Image (spheres, rainbow, N blue to C red):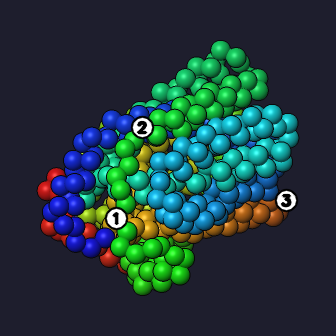
Amino acid sequence: MGAVSKEDEERKSEMFRRVRKRLYLYVVSSSLSSGLSGPFLGVYATRLGASPVELGLFHSLLNLSANVMQVFWGYVADKIGKYRLVVSAFSLAAALLWAPVIASKTASEYIMFASLQALVASASGPTWTALLGLVLPHSAMGASLAKLSQYASFGSMVSTLAAGMISLAVGDTALEFTLPFALSAVFGAVAAVSVLMVREPPLKRPSPISTGLVLRSVRANSDFVRFVALSSLYGASMSVAWPMFTRVAGVELGFGVWELSILTVTSNLSLMVAQQWVGSAVDRYGRRIFIVLGRTLFVVYPAVYALVPGFWTILATNAVMNVVSAFLTTALQAYLLDVTPEDARATYVALYNMALGISFSLGSLAGGFLSNFLDPVLGTWCSTRVVFALSAVLRVVTGLLHLKLKEVARREDLGSG
């Protein structure tokens, strides 16, 4: 945010060279954990008999739980100033909470414990981003984030493929879900230990941080406020379709762990290939153009699920659209770091994530309840397509509104690519 001194840039470049392998270790461990569970959480709810309303509640509560406490976690992390300790402690706690999630026998129990786990795990998000902000060089921010994402994609791809192989071995039983979930807990614990190996530089803080000071700073930061507002509006528009994605995949198409693992592995392969060029492109051309294009092009997902749902069409869509996603994700991360101050970054990121989580929650609830209302009127197939159509229109409109974002990274601060 603002000008970056030559001394700070040299310090961060040297710091990143020293700790990057340890950052990669944490990212891989964490992604191995998420790859064994993330792609299958929603479909497992359908296997436990979740209704459309419960699917809406599942996506809503999971996102709300993952983000509602982030402002508190971020403030505490900024106050303590020991980011790696916070990431480690809450990553370990989230890993342990896999026990009651796996033991759940009904959809309502599963939703409750999965939401609790998301609540605990949410402390790691803003804190990890703040830690990255301390060690990543500004002139190569996009390239550094893309490299980390590449390692994350690799870890997630390997573990998701492993989950698919497990499903083939155990057949159509509860173990095809619960065994990968148990392994996810193991790798989550490994990630919690590995982050302690990252050397954390001292945090430069010109004055004691306080709630009032941070809130005044946020209100005065028009670029951050605009980014949060537009992202929240888009988040609500996008998430309207989420319960319907789960319904089509889990009920209409009957996908299990094997099908979902192949779809996810294909997505991660696309991400890994695209990330070879993402970082330099985001650093050279700026963040806004990739945010606008990426979020607008996400209209493809509800269109495909509504009009031509099937394993192969979804596979092809994932392969193409995850190239777009690679550029979008890196641009969003870089822009967020651009518009947030170093000494209160965890709190800023937490505010952003909380706003996004609330919008995701409201959108998912709206999609679930709208489908539940339309089912007896139009039938399941038609009501699902109406929700997809609504989300598609909203994605285009709110995606184009991101043209209002201001490119805040100075041209001289961006790398030459």
Secondary structure, mark 1, is: loop
Residue type at tag 1: Lys
Q: Which quadrant would residue 73 be assigned to in this image?
A: bottom right
Q: Is residue 198 above or below residue 60?
A: above
The crowd level at tag 1 (other Cα within 10 Å; few <14, some 14-19, many 20+) is few
Quadrant in the picture for the N terminus: bottom left
Q: Position of residue 116 (x, y in %)?
A: 72, 50
| Residue hosting label 2 | 197
| Residue hosting label 1 | 204
Eye-nearest disc, 1 or 3: 1
Residue type at tag 3: Pro
Measure the C-alpha gap from mark 2 to mark 1: 21 Å
| Residue hosting label 3 | 376
Q: Decide if residue 39 is in sight here.
A: no
Measure the C-alpha gap from mark 1 to mark 3: 60 Å
User: Is residue 44 left or right of 391 when viewed as pictured?
Assistant: right
Q: Hey, which residue is sitting farthest top in the picture?
A: 169
Q: Position of residue 148 (x, y in %)?
A: 36, 43
The crowd level at tag 2 (other Cα within 10 Å; few <14, some 14-19, many 20+) is some
User: Is residue 19 left or right of 109 when viewed as pictured?
Assistant: left
Q: Earlier in the sequence, mark 3 or mark 2?
A: 2
Q: Position of residue 376 (x, y in %)?
A: 85, 59
The crowd level at tag 3 (other Cα within 10 Å; few <14, some 14-19, many 20+) is few
